[in-house]
Image (cartoon, rainbow, N blue to C red):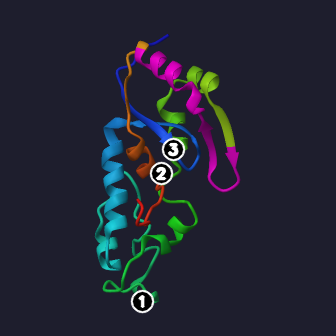
Amino acid sequence: MTTQHQHLVYGHATAHDCLVFADAGTATEEAAEIQALADARTWGEARQVRMTHLWNPAGREYHDPKDGYADDMPFDITEVGAVADGNWPPMVTKRAFTVLPQDLQDRCGKRQVTVHDGDYLEIPVAGEGGLVAELRERGYEVTRDDALINQLGGFRLGSPAA
């Protein structure tokens, strides 16, 4: 068993009703990018949102101003094709494949297959205590933040309740 020195953030992903784990080093910045796009009031503002970790689904290459998406037109993130189709932000439940050790993925989660978005790891909420304890034993720093996890997943994106 190898010892890691990685900081993970995790939480209950409401949309999938399971636990999700993400790299804490980038999670807050990614969530800020998602929120910045959601907060844009015009297409011009949306196009100007700088993305470091994600791609901008409101960019000119996806929504040309000549096609009715002029910079001064009102922007509603829920009307962006990639958001409406569930392709942006990327499915948060996929992250476990890159941040959790393979043996824990195999033992604590179940690979689920989706037709459009690919596989994700379903980790039951009931297994939280044991999984978190084992990660900590292996040297991981683990912090729970349900709000951050759901923001990364785009839960209620553009909703007044978000």
Mark 2 lies on residue = 153
Of residues 143 and 117, which is closer to you in this image? 143
In three-dimensional space, the C-alpha distance between marks 1 and 3, rounded to whole angstroms, equals 38 Å
Comparing labels 2 and 1, the label whose residue is closer to the camera: 2
Dot 2 and dot 1 residues touching (CB under 8 Å): no
In the image, what residue occupies the spot 62% across and 53% down? 117
Q: Which residues are magenta?
A: 113-136
Identified at 35% across, 50% down, the residue is: 30
Foreground mark, 3 or 2? 3
Count numbered badges in the picture: 3
> Few, some or many C-alpha atoms within 10 Å of disc 1 (few <14, some 14-19, many ≥20)?
few
Mark 2 is on which residue type? Gly
Q: In this rendering, does residue 52 appear at all?
A: no
In the rendered structure, which disc, 3 or 2, sits on the residue that comes first in sequence?
3
Q: Are marks 1 and 3 in contact (CB under 8 Å)?
A: no
| Number of the label disc, if any, that sits on residue 13 | 3
How much space separates mark 2 and mark 1, taking CA atoms?
31 Å
Which image quarter holds the C terminus? Answer: bottom left
Q: Check whether the beta carbons of the residues at disc 3 and disc 2 lie within 8 A of each other.
A: yes
